[in-house]
């Protein structure tokens, strides 16, 4: 089983950026944690962080045949990117949308997501734990649809 | 560790009710699955299903001292109940909001939740799996805050 | 043929409550009129009035196997209850939504109904006559779908 | 007792037009059914179908003295015609608004009616049966107000 | 003179629940204070707290003949309950709407009240003092209308 | 100087139609009054009433070369007709919009006019007097632009 | 017959201020024209211009007993002053709202008037001529109501 | 204890102005009633009525050091004045907002208050009694905060 | 292949009407150009211009069996006519919506089209060229669906 | 004559991506078809596809002097990119906006285009044929403006 | 060069009023700083603070011939005063709008300004420094337009 | 002191692009002017122009430790980029938002800025002068916070 893990804009600043909101862990620390879990579950990960909307789109399109599922934290692009939504809809892969913070407890404009309607499901509010839960969720989802 | 699992209105009809949207598992089957997982994690559960908004409120208030955390699927009350929101805010316990379906892919009025802003986090779209992930998430959340 | 007749909140006050808006007939008088008509049409009725949203939901769910159709006047819950909507959608029975007054000639917030989109049809504005027409309508609807 | 039956725009295409939405009966078939029922109830009907908003207005104004009540399916003009609303308000006759389909289960713009607030009542969702119920409703309404 | 005092959902948690917002007094303490004042004013009180919307409706309807006026803190139902509004309008008794906190200084959705338009007046923002002022206000209102 | 006087839908019912709102004068009485005034001012009138939007449009287009100005009471079409607006804009004649009633004191939807932005000016609320003032206004407007 | 003529804020700048929008006549020239017309109609005028909302309110209240009617150009306060609206409603005098320009052809926020719903009628778009027509209109309105 | 009592625009017309809405008492009568009550409570009042928004602002700013609290009926300025809101916020005194009528039962635009979010509390709907209750409320509020 | 070409209201004024917006060509000139092109493509045209919404509806319904496709410039009715939309949906023919001007660069209300969602496609902004492109487009569309 | 053909984000996936919506042709196939047509019309094309908003902006700016016109399918950026709109406005070249699908028959958010108001015209709904028509349209537009 | 410096309502309270938002400097201190800078730049200032909207309007109109430019902090009137906007537009002088605080980081209603669209430019968020920058900006703007 | 100067999309076209709106100066000319001023103020600048949102984000993040403050003209991204907002909030540096034109006098969608709430202040409307004022403002801001 092969999963894309996509981190959106500004997530390279994790740990430095408003730790009260996003936690103190850095992105490499989170990635290591995910790799470890993936190995336990016998899953192969391809992990990338992008600040550019266009690069996220290309990454999704280019890996459409490689991947069995996507875990994506679209960060700020969650609320503004029709193009990433279209990319996810185009490749027709199970997709879990992830957020570190509980976006529904923040500014009004963060309550809306272009991505959610084309995702399989959404997990938010558990800090780095959101990614861990999402990895379990995507594996569970792919296994489920394999069974059918 | 003691957790409330609260199922909202109409969830007693699970399995019968629009299986294309909500899956074929019945509520007792989901509850059994959660009990099994809880035992593995050494967690005590108190599970209940209510069709009445007022009973959910009373259940939360009455168990405020017993519980360490709440997993709640407010179902239809998600979108209309300020009173359940106030109950959750009042007891100040870590709370995970859960939905079987991906509410963001359904009718517009299901995109809004009165509960989310006072919850710790939200998990939706993974069928019965949403509950399993939520139980892991609440345990993880309580452990985390215990450490601090 | 077996039909549920459900009267929503405050309808127990009929006759007393704003007679200029709702008419002078009491609920027992309306129920008697419906029973008489039902006998003529060889239809069995189960009639109930509830002030609680949760009790309406339970009543619908509990009678899902008994009933062939529903006539419901959701009264104030028309405009606020996603949960009753979900109950009706869940049991997948022909349903007629009824109002004594012409809700479209009253306050703006009474123009919107959560129930209408999941009902077979809507009848409003004819006082107690709305119920009589609704009983004919539900029988006609069930007969029609039986023929197909 | 004399009743106007007014069919709005495109209803001449009934049977041909989207039968999944509007049913397979043609307008002449519906009219024949109404005439038969009217004779049983000793009611005289004047039936007409118009594609033009102006012709509907003139028909209402010209028959204001002849008629005791109006049954109108304003079709598409339901949602856009202040002028037909004004015509109905001007002649001050009991009026039943009728729709073949359940307009509340269709596009958002079909949920609003300029006609409803000046009508006595509304019946929708029962196909050709909506007209039959409406004829009964208008007769019942006129009889009621005659008694007072 | 006989007055209903109705406390809405979650008010049983007073003192425990967000004391920064709602104050440190418990509900029994407030009730005792009101009873004392009522005795001084020679007024009989019937006091109740309900978490269920339906029970509030029934309580109002059942006491319609007993009571001369109503003091109600609808709490969260203020913003969502058409049914309680209809109950108050139905019994046609002078009614004072009360809130402990200044709802206009809180979340946007708390600025709207379904109850206010059918109440005689509104008092909010004075903690437990809101109830005291409301009791004086309802007595004053009943005395006034008695004089006319 | 030659002026079109255009009466919109339902104005043929004047005197009969809601006299509390529109006054007791009939349309022929108003027209006679205008003709008399026009003769005094040495102005030629062409007066017509139409229930059909299309006929109003054709009347404006067909008389574009004959007329020096337009006085129009678009009645219900005020609020819904882009087509009449376009006709007035197309012929580029001074135009006075007239209403018998004060539309701003009536239903919300009557506060908006598609016609006003392409008219020279608006006069409303003076019953039949609105037409008299409008005739003076259009003559004054044409004289003014002739002088420049 | 005694009429108040009230000019709102910035109208003292007439002639200087955006002549393309408001014309080249100064306020004293318009006032002279109105005085001349008033004498012909045997009407007494009290004319004043105010930049302050409060002074307009006081002027209306102080002259409530003196005046038989009001002609007011509220200028910018048209769109923002509930207080002037209340003053006009309080004195219960026939009132004509006047604008030099056609406000409906300008910025969106100028399309709304707090004053119009409490005025007898509205006249706009005829430059200084708007005042002349308004004076005729108010006299006509007062004469009419005197006759009844 | 020293309290400012501020009456907003048009309140000088009380008794004359729409008595069905505002009652028959004049402002001097209300002020006398308040003075009498103030003496009983050993409170010094400074009472003023203003039609001008600017004068209200100056009055608040100029008395910031003299006063211990404010009772203000902002009347029409309630709905339009950010400047009075800012004045109240600036002086940081306990403030009770008062209305004679129940503003929530009137026009939509009267439901919104710029003042309420910066006030301690709101009292409306009890006619002149609103002021009496407000005086008690402000004294109670000041005493309370003195105790802390 | 047989195509309906339908010109909406006011298009008879082309060349005269605001040439800066709509161009200098008259409607007969455009029609001649289309006829010439149609002959080259071996297509039969039926061309008509209507000012009346009802006539457009009838024309579509009456030619439903004759035509293989529709090119329609609904002009002002684009933004207001549900009835023309319903006519097009009813006859289930490929339909191209055409506009001379770029409607998206004009007034806000011209950005919305009731017709577009039931059309095959939309072409606007190329003056008379829009019709030429639309004729090519409809032929291409019909050929395409014939092939399938 | 030299034309830019710009394909927006995800169009590289054509053929693969939701063929029910976008058709089965690949982008190279469409480009070949356009090149062939361009040669017939003696037009030089520069064709490019970009997933990045910034690259589209740079491509437009960099080719501003080379190109005589632009054909652009902004895809998802249609609905979100002010920056591409500004680029098109800046270079002041005739521009045709193209869409494969009829965007007006899809999700609400696809009905709005930032690009349309600054384009010469819009063509949508004809699959690959939209591009062919657009190429004809841009050539026609440039020829037209050359003649003036 | 002669510049008006206008301080809006409540700015007389500077230093006292919410220093966390508006800073600790008093208005006389700011004025002194501006006078000093003005002398350096050889500019004459006329400085005034007003709590009354009407006085600001009169001040602008009365100094229209004296001044070469305006620096105005409209404070609360920014968001509510069409009349000050009209005054600024009327005198046609270069105008800089100034705010001490960053209004866009405060309440929603402070994000809208009636003044900005008629101003030359806007400067906000730099405390007293906003005025200093504004004085430089207005001088720079006047010099620029003098050169043309 | 070290300052980032960031120019957003399309600003490379300055001088060429709509000079009526943006002025005739090119970007290199503005940059030279800023360098000259910076040297006078003993400030080091790092200046860059980007068409890509992602590159702006990376530039901010990469220079977070180098810079003491940011002057940014986000151009079109002002109105659409949550991601740039998040980058600015993340690095927690004083930031001045700059616009050449007065955005509040242009299209509605340019009145909203995602950036302003996280900026220290905003300066717009002074052409290239906006940058000069912004450089002064950022230096003043940094000096101020250094002093505290």
Image (cartoon, coloured by chain):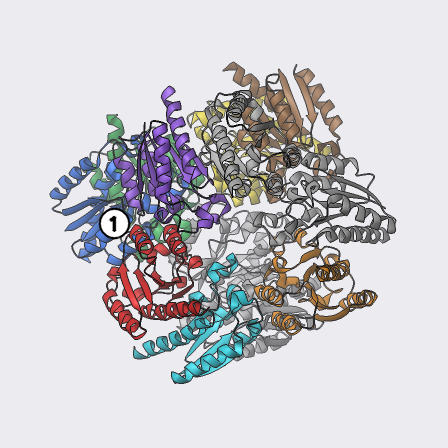
Chain colours: B orange, E cyan, F green, G blue, H red, I yellow, J brown, K purple
Task: For mark 1, give the secondary structure.
Answer: helix
Query: To which chain does the residue with label 1 belong?
Result: G
Write down the quadrant of residue I33 in the picture: top right
Can the viewer see residue J109? yes
Q: Residue K125: x percent and y percent?
A: 47, 41
- Does E78 sit above or below residue K42? below
- Does J71 sit above or below residue F111? above
Q: Horizontal placement of H86 versus J119: left or right?
A: left
Q: Residue B98: x percent and y percent?
A: 70, 60
Q: Which residue is mark 1?
A: G56
Q: What is the total number of numbered labels drawn onto the structure image?
A: 1
Which of I114 and E73 lies nearest the eye of the viewer? E73
Q: Residue B43: x percent and y percent?
A: 78, 68
Quarter the N terminus of chain J occupies? top right
Q: Horizontal placement of E125 versus J57: left or right?
A: left
Write down the quadrant of residue J15 in the picture: top right
Can the viewer see residue I44? no
Which of E20 and J13 lies nearest the eye of the viewer? E20
Q: Horizontal placement of I125 versus K138: left or right?
A: right
Judge the density around disc 1: few (<14), some (14-19), many (≥20) Cα neighbours within 10 Å: many
- Which residue is located at x 28 percent, y 73 percent? H39
Q: Residue E117: x percent and y percent?
A: 43, 65
């Amino acid at each position: 089983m092969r999963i894309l893990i996509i981190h959106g804009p500004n997530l390279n600043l994790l740990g430095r950026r408003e730790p009260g909101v996003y936690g103190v862990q850095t992105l490499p620390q989170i990635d290591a944690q995910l790799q470890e879990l993936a190995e336990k579950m016998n899953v192969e990960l391809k992990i990338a962080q992008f600040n550019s909307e266009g690069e996220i789109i290309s990454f999704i399109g280019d890996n459409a045949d490689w991947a069995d599922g996507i875990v994506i934290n679209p960060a700020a692009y969650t609320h503004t990117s029709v193009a990433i939504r279209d990319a996810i809809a185009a490749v027709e892969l199970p997709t879990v949308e992830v957020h570190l913070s509980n976006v529904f407890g923040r500014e009004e404009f963060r309550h809306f997501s272009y991505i959610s309607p084309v995702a399989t499901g959404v997990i938010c509010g558990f800090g780095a734990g959101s990614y861990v839960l999402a990895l379990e969720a995507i594996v569970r989802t792919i296994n489920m649809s394999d069974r059918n």
